[in-house]
Amino acid sequence: MQRVAHDSATYPQDVLAALDAKVELVRKHFPPSVANLFAKPRPGSDGALQWWSELGGQPTPYTQLDEQQQSRLLQIYQQRQDALGHLANALQGRGDAAPASALRSLIGPPDLHNLYSLNGDPVVVRWGLPALPPPAVAPSSAPAPARHGRRWLWLALLPLLLIGLLWLLWFWRGYLLHVFNPQPLVSYACQKDPSVAPDFVVVLDTSGSMNINIAASQADEQWFFQEGQHYDARHPRKAMLLSEPTRLAVAKNAFGGMIGSLHPDIDMRLITFAGCDRQVDQGVFAHAERQQLLAGLQNITANEGTPLAASLEKAASLVDGRRRDAVVVMFIDGEDGCERDVCAVSRRIAREQPRLRVNVVNIGESTLSNCIAENTGGRVYSASSEQEVSRILLQASEEVSSAAQCQ
């Protein structure tokens, strides 16, 4: 734990305790990465306020970052803010008004002068503090200037404003329904009277980074694609990164358990990548065709870019998600590498297909694609070992599994 910033002001202990309670509420529902967005307030030995973080690395003010680093930091900040908003809406829908209100008090644009980067993760200081009272201003004896409002202009514009408002409400109707009235997708095996099985699609990342070892870090991956291409396969670091088990090999092995656990009524569609320009629809496989699917998986190879946004659009276009439930599981190892905004795509899909849920299984260190699940009411899973991948892939497909944990 390290100090990020300090102030000269002092605050009562009950104010700091209230801030701590909000962070603990976030930590209760989210992994540490979301809770670590907010630095912890602690009084120093002199009583002045200090701000501490559990993240490692050198704290760098937002204003000292370059333009690319600033853009990336704000992206991550907004993803974590979106996650808080979805949780607040879900709690409100369950009748938990107090914690929902506490979470909403944490939502808003960042004060860039109080935003820091710690190894690329955003950390906010001086958040949630009560505003200092404004200085007293002596009343002026000068008369107030006359106001010459043009009320007729506002009256003329009022119909246009109302039309624009109605259009916006119609355009965003699906997304608003999804956000403010979130309906949990009950696992098919747990439904009392299942009539129509949900659509089910798996998007398997087959980009070139899936050829590296499952234990590779983000720094390893950057070295491999930036410098490692200049070395032959005997270079120690490159040889380690190309050794088994690779990310793709782990994915193939884990898919066997997931496919075997699917409910007999569920048909599975598989989508893979063929670079930024094409997504490959491998077809739909019914219960009787699952061995054929498993055999075909072994022949899939990885190469080229990572079109996450395009593959998500492809998956969404092949399911209903409006009158019929749909589940998409995206097995990925990072962020979109084809210059598309996957967060914007997932927001649009949530608006247009409110019964579509996307669960993300991320075996990379980047969190920029977590917004896919957060925007569509899905779940995010992270893993860095072969054993973890097999376990969480089963959890990510629970909605269509015959072994779902029913309440």
Image (cartoon, rainbow, N blue to C red):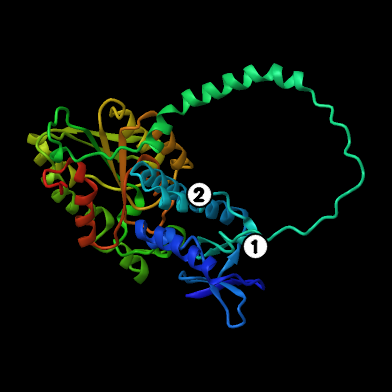
- Residue 326 position in % (x across, y down): 26, 34
Residue most extreme to the bottom = 45
Who is closer to the viewer here, 274 or 386?
386
Cβ–Cβ under 8 Å for marks 1 and 2: no
Residue type pointed to by label 1: Gln
Disc 1 or disc 2, which is closer to the eye?
Answer: 2
Residue drawn at point x = 63 percent, y = 56 percent: 112
Residue type pointed to by label 2: Gln
Q: Secondary structure at mark 1?
A: helix
- Residue 242 position in % (x across, y down): 30, 62
Q: Upstream in the sequence, badge 1 or badge 2?
A: 1
Quarter of the figure with residue 246: bottom left
Quarter of the figure with residue 338: top left
Residue most extreme to the right = 142
Number of numbered tags placed on the structure image: 2
Please state if 335 lies on the left or on the right of 249 as rendered: right
Please state if 189 lies on the left or on the right of 362 as rendered: left
Who is closer to the viewer here, 333 or 188?
188
Q: Is residue 173 above or below residue 217?
A: above
Q: CA distance from mark 1 to mark 2?
A: 20 Å
Is disc 1 surrounded by few (<14), some (14 to 19) or many (20+) residues within 10 Å? few
Residue to which mark 2 is pinned: 78
Residue to which mark 1 is pinned: 64
Please state if 18 lies on the left or on the right of 384 as rendered: right
Quarter of the figure with residue 310: top left
